[in-house]
Image (cartoon, rainbow, N blue to C red):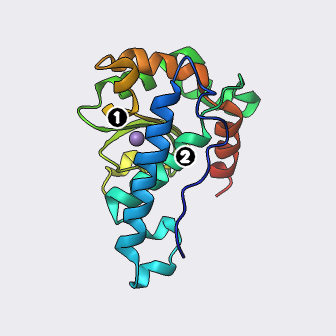
């Protein structure tokens, strides 16, 4: 099995002005492509070559980088959307309001030290929780604390390369802008799927 770079589900400039075209071109076309390339090189001729991506996340950096970015592109959209009844009520049950959830997710993204990701996950007892991970780790890996384990349904890349061209060191401005381009329909769809696992 050769892993391939999935095409973006929208034009590289579609998320302007919140995420600019140049950032998307470099982020998807160079960074994500690099993860796929190095992942394929690392597994070539090994028993992992025929394994699905979920099985090889233990090749942490490149496998994680590929999985994380693939999810990230899919949960972004230039089209405005809302979480829908089922996901919204689960969020309200956990955090009271959607706004409070967004504040706490934003906080997790801003306070992640160095490079990493913020996550909304469906955990082992089907509860929603927010966490963050360093580098290209994610909550499917056995490297995260047990209480952070879960199936990711929303994520945000807070590596500097995700925002530096447009926002320089102003990570919080990037995180605030992110909420304008979340594909809530896709997040809701992933929520439903994770709840039925
Ligand atoms: Mn990235």
Out of 181 and 82, give the one closest to the viewer.
181
Q: Would residue 63 be visible to someone looking at this image?
A: yes
**Residue depicted at 48% across the width and 54% down the height:** 67
Q: Is mark 1 on a helix, strand or loop?
A: helix
Q: In which quarter of the image is ligand 1?
A: top left
Q: Would residue 153 be visible to someone looking at this image?
A: no
Query: Residue 71's mark?
Result: 2
Name the mark nearer the viewer: 2 or 1.
1
Figure label count? 2
**Residue depicted at 47% across the width and 16% down the height:** 176
Instruction: Report whether the residue tagged 1 is closer than 8 Å to ligand 1.
Output: yes
Out of 140 and 177, give the one closest to the viewer.
177
Residue 100: image location, x then y, percent? 51, 16
CA gap between label 2 and label 1 equals: 17 Å
Nearer-N-terminus badge (2/1): 2
- Within the image, what quadrant is residue 114 found in? top left
**Residue depicted at 39% across the width and 75% down the height:** 43
Residue 36: image location, x then y, percent? 45, 60
**Residue depicted at 37% across the width and 71% down the height:** 41
Q: In which quarter of the image is the N terminus?
A: bottom right
Vertical relation: 156 (above or below) 47: above
In the displayed structure image, the side of residue 45 where residue 184 appears, left or right:
right
Residue 193: image location, x then y, percent? 68, 51
Out of 63 and 32, give the one closest to the viewer.
32
Residue 99: image location, x then y, percent? 55, 15
Q: What is the crowding at mark 2: few (fewer than 14 residues within 10 Å), some, or many (at least 20)?
A: some
Vertical relation: 20 (above or below) 197: above
- Within the image, what quadrant is residue 96 found in? top right
Q: Name the residue under label 1.
A: 161
């Amino acid at each position: 099995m050769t892993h391939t770079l999935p095409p973006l589900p929208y034009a590289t400039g579609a998320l302007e002005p919140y995420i600019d075209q140049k950032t998307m071109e470099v982020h998807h076309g160079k960074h994500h492509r690099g993860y796929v390339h190095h992942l394929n090189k690392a597994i070539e001729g090994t028993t992992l070559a025929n394994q699905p991506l979920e099985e090889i996340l233990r090749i942490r950096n490149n496998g994680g980088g590929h999985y994380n970015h693939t999810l990230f592109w899919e949960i972004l959209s230039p089209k405005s959307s809302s979480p829908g009844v089922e996901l919204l009520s689960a969020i309200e049950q956990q955090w009271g309001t959607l706004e409070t959830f967004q504040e706490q997710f934003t906080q997790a993204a801003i306070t992640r030290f160095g490079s990493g990701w913020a996550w909304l996950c469906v955990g082992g007892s089907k509860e929603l929780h927010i966490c963050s991970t360093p580098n290209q780790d994610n909550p499917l890996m056995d490297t995260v604390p047990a209480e952070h384990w879960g199936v990711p349904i929303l994520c945000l890349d807070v590596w500097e390369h995700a925002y530096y061209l447009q926002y320089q060191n102003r990570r919080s401005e990037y995180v605030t802008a992110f909420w304008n381009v979340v594909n809530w329909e896709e997040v809701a769809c992933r929520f439903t799927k994770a709840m039925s696992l």
